[in-house]
Amino acid sequence: MRKKDYFCTMKRILSFWSIVIGCLLPYAGHAEPLRQQIRSLQVVVNDNPLAPPVMALGGRNHVCISFDELSHEYHRYIYKVEHCNADWSPSTEIFESDYLEGFNEQPIENYEKSFNTTLLYTHYRFCIPNKDLRLKLSGNYRVSIYNDEEGNDDEPVLQACFSVVEPLMNIAAQVSSNTDIDFNREHQQVSFSVNYAGCNVTDPNRELRTVVMQNRRTDNRVTDLRPDIQTATGVQFSHNRRLIFEAGNEFRKFEILDVHGPSMNVDRMEWFDPFYHATLYEDTPIRNYVYDEDKNGARIIRNRDNDDNATTCEYLFVHFSLKTPPIPGGDVYVYGQWTGAFSPEYKMNYNPQRQAYEAALLLKQGYYNYSYLFVPEGTEKGNSTKTDGNFYQTENEYLIFVYHRPSGGRYDKLAGFKTIDYNINH
């Protein structure tokens, strides 16, 4: 299919996807736009776009949430902050005044129109804490953003999630390719211990909730683990088969810094009015491991000038293709930290003429990591077995969350957080 024809098809179905996406709720704990005209949502802690969305309670720590709305029309967006339990359900046993100091449901006052871009957009941004609002408790937080002009508080245009940790417990962790099901083959196993000597924990099985994530994925996260060993001052999780993860592979990557010429992993740049189009080199399933440094699925929005990136970067259609026979029994998705859940927008279509899966995504200029995940029918968990492979050498980031609700407690506090990188290549 020619790109001009493809764009016409995309234009016809954008309105349909906007309805579909608007009916979806994000996976627990993940930031995701819920309207088609909202793009490039970012949740950044302490100005580090590569850090996980977790910040310490108090001090000068802050989280900034930003997004683009695809027009130059001003919209009065209101943000509402909500405390959540460990499973991201609302914390119904505490009041807003328990976890917030100040005023909730404030308008976003920091916004700026794009400058000299082919696709017009307005960039909105706000940070927490600010002059109107400060967080008082640790735990999970969901921020819902509404268009005040629509007057419908039941339909946010986006939801962003982050966590606040009150480091009361120490976590020691390790990752090994010597797992309980194989040795230096396709998996990695996490083991960790939690020391809660400084906390009043009388029944860890009831009071503690743990979550382990690989590269911040929500589809294969592990929750509600039971410890293997319990002592007077802590618990240990070792030889737990639920903590065995498919190792995956290093993320593929591309970079678009200049819309007038190809850069890393871009085959060609073209202009089909009214959009630029970037065609990536054709991918194939990976059969052998080759180390290639990546950022575990992250993206960094930037252009060649690296100045005023928020408002000067172009939007363009990026064309992905994975040449392989059709994989029966499910769907293939383009995946990265920036895609979030397996929403319809990122599902690839199979082209029998080219014998390849294809997708065209409207993205903002920058550096992107991506992979291809296969999601079997009837499930919400992806795997890379038939697309990118699983290799024990793969460098992965694991996040460990430990929540505590003591007997009689009314909310889940995040009492411990740990990141651990598995990397045998350095």
Image: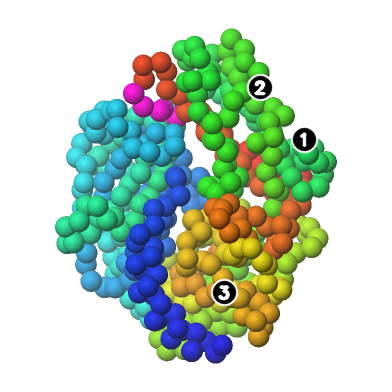
Q: Which residue is mark 1?
A: 180
236 lies left or right of 69: right
Q: Which residue is mark 3?
A: 349
CB contact under 8 Å: marks 2 and 1: no
Give the x, y percent position of residue 2.
55, 89
Residue occupying image coordinates x 44% and y 34%: 86
Q: CA distance from mark 2 to mark 1?
A: 14 Å
Q: Which of disc 3 and disc 2 is earlier in sequence?
A: 2
Q: CA distance from mark 2 to mark 3?
A: 44 Å
Please give the count of numbered marks on the rendered protein: 3
CB contact under 8 Å: marks 1 and 3: no
In the rendered structure, which segment of residues is drawn in magenta? 410-415
Q: Which residue is mark 2?
A: 228
- Position of 271 relative to 77 (above/below): below
Q: Amino acid at mark 3?
A: Asn
- Position of 196 relative to 398 (above/below): above
Q: Which of disc 1 and disc 2 is earlier in sequence?
A: 1
Q: Amino acid at mark 1?
A: Asp
Within the magenta stretch, is there residue 263?
Answer: no
**Element at badge 3?**
strand
Q: Amino acid at mark 2?
A: Asp
Front-most of residues 208 and 310: 208
Give the x, y percent position of residue 310.
39, 64
Residue occupying image coordinates x 38% and y 65%: 20
